[in-house]
Image (cartoon, rainbow, N blue to C red):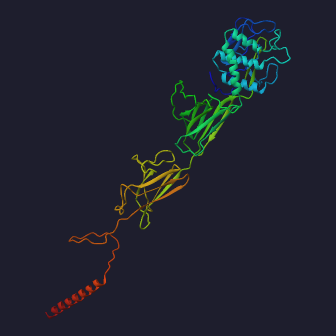
Amino acid sequence: MGWSLRPKAVTGLLATCLLGALSVAVAPTASAATQEGVGYEITPGQPVGGVTPKRGWLGSYVVGGKQVFCVSFQLKAPDTGEKYKPGDELRDKWGQALPADKAANISYLLLRYGDTKNNDEAAALAHLLHSWTSAPREGKNDLDPGLPPEKIGYDAPRHLKTLRDNGHAAAADAADKLTKEAEANRGPWTATIAAPSTEQHIGTPAAWTITVKNSQGTGIPDVPVKLAATDASVDEAGAKATGTEQQDKAGNASPQAATKDVTVKTGKDGTVTVKLTPSGEHPQLAGSLSAPADRPYVQFPVTQGSGLATQNVVSTGGEKELKVQGAVNVAKPGQLQVTKTDKKTGKGIAGAQLRITGKDKSAAATGQDGKPLNGPDGKPVVVTTDGSGVATVEKIQAPQDICVVEVSAPPGYTNAFDPANPPSACGSVKSGETLALSVVNVPNEVPHAIPAGDKPVAMAQGTVETQYSTPGLIGLGVLALLGSALVGIAARRASRR
C-alpha cells in the first residue's frame, strides 16, 4: 500500500484502471476467465435488466497480471487476458465530461490507492469511482431496475447500505475518508527544490530542501521523490523527513553511503531535506515524482468477447511526472602569495620555510577540494620561498581565514627568532582573489668592538667606523714626533758604523 513510482506506459495495460466494477453475472461466483483482485463480494447486487443479481463485486480485477480498477458500471468485467488500446479523456457513463474536481479526485485516488492490498480501501475506491462516473442524472430515471447494463446508473446509497449489511462497515467508512483525502490533496501539485542561498564549496555538504504541495498550497506527506545529482553526491543518511525514516532495501533503517541517485520521501509537512556535497564546479540536484494527472484517460477493450460491452480502463494510471531542478554556484578558489623580507633592507629572503595554517595558527588550512592542506608528514603544509623571497599556494577554499607561520629562522636571522612566538602573518582569502602576505625577519646585529686576547678573533662582515676625540689627536701627535726622533737617532748610529 502507498504511493507508486510506476513509469508512464505507452503500450499494454497499466497497474490501475479507473473503476472497480460490479459484475453483472447472476451466477453466485465470478466467471472463471475473470480474476477478482482486492475488495468485497456484496449480496445481493443492484437490480439491472429486471433481474437482481445474487452477488456483486466492489473492488479491483487482475488483468494481464496487474491490478486494475475498471469502467463502466454493470458492463462485462474484463477477463485476465483482455487487450486494450489507448482511448480518450475519461467521461461519465453518459458521455459527458467529468467536472474538474471529480476528475482530479479520481486521478489522486488512483495514484494513492491504485495498488492497495487493503480490502476496505479497494472496495471504497471502486464505490467512489462508480459514484462519480455513473451517478444518476437529475431528471432522468437512470436507476430504473428494468434498464439494461449500458444504461443503468450507480445507486450509491444502496451500495453503502449493502456494504454495512454484509459486515463491511469499515469499507463504507473508508469511502468518506478517501473522499476527504482526495479533496484535500488532489492536483495540480507543485514541486520545488531550494538550494542553499550562498555558494557551496567542493567537498563541503550543505542542505537542499525538496517541497511538494497540493493545489491549495499544503504540503503532501509520504511522496517518494527520486533525486539525481550532477557534479555532486547526495548523503542519503542525511536525508530528513518529518515522521519518516530512510530505509534500506530490506526495509531496515540504516544510513546509506553518499550516492548520485537516491529516493526519499516527504515528511508530514511535505518537505524533505538532503545533504548535497559538490564534487565539481557546477553542482545540480534534479528530482522527479509521480503526481495526480489533471484528468485521467481511459483505454478501450480491443474485443468485446461474448458481445456484451466490456468495461474500460485508465491508460495513465491517474498520474503524471513532475520534474524539478536546482543549481548552485561553487565558490571560486583563492590563492596565497607570501613574501619573506629583510626588515632593514626590505629585500626578499630566499629559502625561508613557512607553514600554512588556519586562523588558529595550528590546524591546516582547507583546499578547494575540501581537504586539509597537509604535507607528507600529516601536518599543515610547509612552503619554501624562491630566489625573490616569494612562495605561492593555489586552490585554497574561499572565503577562509588563514595564517603563515615561520618554521625556523633562515641563516643570518637567528638572533631575533623566538621559537615560542615565530614571525607570522594572517589574512582572509576571498573567492577568486589572491591574498598577499609578508613576513619580515630581523637580521643579526654586527659586533662593534674586538674582544681582547692573544688569539685572533673572527670578524663578522660589515662596515666598521672609527671615531676620534680632540685630546686623543694631540696625544697621537706627540707619539708621532717621538717616534720620528727615535727613527732618526737609529739612522745616525747606523751611518757611523
Quarter that holds the N terminus: top right
Residue 106 location (% of width, % of height): 72, 23
Is residue 6 in sight in this rendering? yes
Residue 295 location (% of width, % of height): 75, 27
Q: Nearer the viewer, residue 345 or 169?
A: 169
Is residue 316 in sight in this rendering? no
The answer to whether 381 is drawn above or below residue 208 in the figure is: below
In the picture, residue 273 is in which quadrant?
Answer: top right
Q: Nearer the viewer, residue 270 or 60?
A: 270
The answer to whether 161 is drawn above or below residue 249 in the figure is: above
In the picture, residue 494 is in which quadrant?
Answer: bottom left
Residue 141 location (% of width, % of height): 85, 14
Quarter that holds the C terminus: bottom left
The answer to whether 231 is drawn above or below residue 135 in the figure is: below
Q: Nearer the viewer, residue 139 or 462?
A: 139
Residue that lies at the very extreme toward the left in this rendered image: 497
